[in-house]
Amino acid sequence: MAKVVNLNGMTIKVVDSQEKDAFLTQDDKDMDISATAAVRAALNRAKICGKPIARYDTVTHRVYIENADGTIRFVE
């Protein structure tokens, strides 16, 4: 079921990936694919350039920084 979130006076509908066919148009799906590809490209570019990448650990629910050498530093 879609989750509705109110943020700064705007209503945002969060759709589960299993339900996206019922809610998203083909243009929405295409934009979703393009946005995902853009994020992957930006992460790959940052890794190649040796820049740190901020990530979120879904198990511990903590944010961490992953350095180019593979070391991880959790953010307080």
Image (cartoon, rainbow, N blue to C red):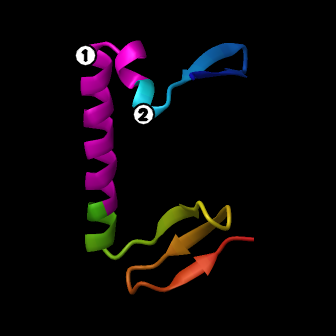
Q: Which residues are magenta?
A: 20-43
Q: Is residue 11 toward the left or the right of residue 39 in the image?
A: right
Residue 31 x, y percent position in the rendering: 29, 26
Quadrant of residue 9 in the image?
Answer: top right
Q: Is residue 54 above or below residue 11?
A: below
Residue 54 x, y percent position in the rendering: 52, 64
- Mark in the foreground, 2 or 1: 2
Q: Residue at x 75, y 71 (%)?
A: 76
Q: Is residue 16 toward the left or the right of residue 41 in the image?
A: right
Q: Is residue 41 toward the left or the right of residue 63 in the image?
A: left
Q: Residue at x 42, y 84 (%)?
A: 70
Within 10 Å of disc 1 (Cα), the crowding (few <14, some 14-19, many 20+) is: few
Mark with earlier residue (2, 1): 2
Task: Look at the image and say whether residue 33 sits in the magenta stretch.
Answer: yes
Amino acid type of disc 1? Gln
Q: Is residue 33 above or below residue 37?
A: above
Q: Residue at x 25, y 35 (%)?
A: 34
- Residue bearing the label numbered 1: 26
- Residue bearing the label numbered 2: 17
Quadrant of residue 33 in the image?
Answer: top left
Q: Is residue 40 above or below residue 48?
A: above
C-alpha distance separating marks 2 and 1? 14 Å
